[in-house]
Amino acid sequence: MKQVSFWFDPVSPYAYLAFERLPQVLEGLSYNVAYRPVLFAGLLQHWGQKGPAEIEPKRVWTYRDVAWRAHEQGTRLDLPASHPFNPLALLRLALACAPAGGQPNRYVVEKLFHHVWQGGADANDAQRLAALRAELQPQRDPDDSAVKAELRENTEAAVELGIFGVPTVVCDGLVAWGTDALPLLSQQIRGDPWFDGPEWRAASEPRPGVSRR
C-alpha cells in the first residue's frame, strides 16, 4: 500500500484543486493518504518568499489561472470575499477534529476547502466559522495550546522535508509540489522506469550560478 502525505493550507486555491483531483491521480492504486495541515505563511517566511497574492500582477494571474484550472477539471471554485486571509482558525479546526498527534480525515479537509472555495463568502466570518465548527464537532478545542503546537510541528516537519509551498504531495521519497506535479507523481509511484534513469538523477545535481544573496 502506498503511503501518501498531502500537505495543504486551505488558503491556497491550488491546494483545493489538487485535493479534488488527487483520487483520480491515485486511481487503481492501493494507498493511504495522510492530510497534513501546514501554515503556508510559515513556509514562505522560512524560505524568504512572498505568496502569489502578495505580488499584484501575480495575484491577478493567479485568480485567472485557478478559475481556468477549475473549469478545465470540472471543479466548482468561487473566489472568497477576502483573499488572502488568515487561515489559522481553519488549520487548527482541522487538527482538532483528530485525536492528539493525528491528522484530519478527507471528510474534514473537504469541508474546510468547500467552506473557503465554494459560495464566495468570507472564510473568516465568525458566524460561518461557528457553523462549520458545530458541523464538524471537533474532538478537541481548536484554541487549545496543544493543537496550536501541533500546527507548528507540522510546519516545522514540512520545512525539514524541504517543502516550500502548497500543495505538496510526498510519496516514496518524492516531494511533488503544485497541481502541475500530479501527473509526474502518478507516473513515479506507478513505477515508470524513467525515474530510475540518468535524466531524473542529473536534474537534481547542483550547478554553479549567480546568487542574489
Image (tube, rainbow, N blue to C red):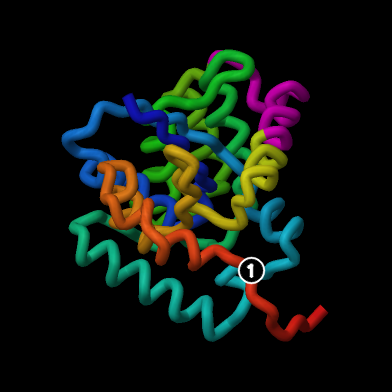
Q: Magenta includes 120?
A: no
| 142 within the magenta span | yes
Relative horizontal placement of residue 101, taking residue 34 as reference (left or right): right
Identify whether 77 is placed above or below 175.
Answer: below
Q: Main secondary structure of the magenta part?
A: helix
Horizontal side, residue 195 vs residue 175: left or right: left
Q: Quadrant of residue 158?
A: top right
Q: Position of residue 101 (x, y in %)?
A: 62, 18
Left or right side of 118 for 35: right
Query: In what element is the residue under mark 1?
Result: loop
Quarter of the image with the N terminus is top left
Q: Nearer the viewer, residue 115 or 27?
A: 27
Left/right placement of residue 111 relative to residue 157 reads: left
Q: Which residues are magenta?
A: 139-153
Percent position of residue 209, x then y: 69, 82
- Density class for disc 1 (Cα within 10 Å; few <14, some 14-19, many ≥20) is few
Q: Is residue 83 above or below residue 213?
A: above
Q: Which residue is mark 1?
A: 206
Residue at 21% across / 59% down in the picture?
73
Tell which of 196 and 78 is nearer to you. Answer: 196
**Residue at (23%, 33%) from the top-left corner?**
29
Q: Residue at x 58, y 82 (%)?
A: 56
Q: Amino acid at mark 1?
A: Pro
